[in-house]
Image (cartoon, helix red, strand yellow):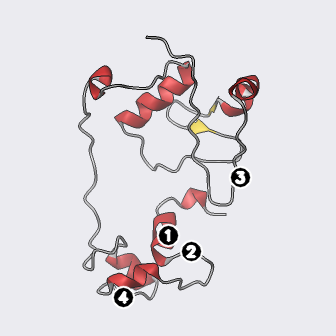
Amino acid sequence: MKHSTRILIAILAVGQVMTFVSAQEALAQRKQINRFRDGQTLAFPGAEGASLVRDAVDKRLMNDIKNRTGKLLDSQDEVGGWPKLKSKPAPKDADRDGMADAWETANNLDPKNPNDRNGDAHKDGYTNLEEYLNSLCPQLKE
């Protein structure tokens, strides 16, 4: 079964704006979109990838985008089944709020208070949890 629909996947850094255009217009502008810096990272003008490490699924998706061979899947069996993804152990998080205890301590938060994840210590509109998650990818900071 052949699909004529093309899907564009974009990861944007905080503060960036994405403009949606017709498929025809997007294809006409593809030189601006499909810029690969290396074999693993899809580079959009002015943006960096948010993943620190590309896993097998990321690599397959990027390869499909690069080679224009991607399609909608009906089953994981179409791509060899569920992959076995490797992961590093999660850092200690005593209150299970999604923020590492060491980071909370370094940022004057309480590693035993799960409610501090919703606070905004910097008064910048980002919750403490968002600040923590953004700190995991320092290349995305302004």
The residue beneath circle 2 is 126
Quote the CA–CA distance across marks 3 and 2: 18 Å
Query: Label 3 belongs to which residue?
Result: 17
Q: CA distance from mark 1 to mark 4?
A: 16 Å
- Secondary structure, mark 4, is loop
Direction from residue 142 to residue 130 in the image, left or right: left
Q: Assess disc 1: are there few (<14), some (14-19) or many (≥20) residues with their C-alpha within 10 Å of its C-alpha.
A: some
- In this orientation, which residue lies closer to the viewer: 107 or 80? 80
Q: Amino acid at mark 4?
A: Asp
Label 3: element kind: loop
Question: Real-space Cα distance between discs 1 and 2?
Answer: 6 Å
Q: CA distance from mark 1 to mark 3?
A: 19 Å
Q: Which of pointers 4 and 3 indicates the residue nearer the eye?
A: 3
Q: Disc 4 marks which residue?
A: 110
Q: Which mark is residue 82?
A: none
Residue at 56% x, 74% y: name it. Answer: 126
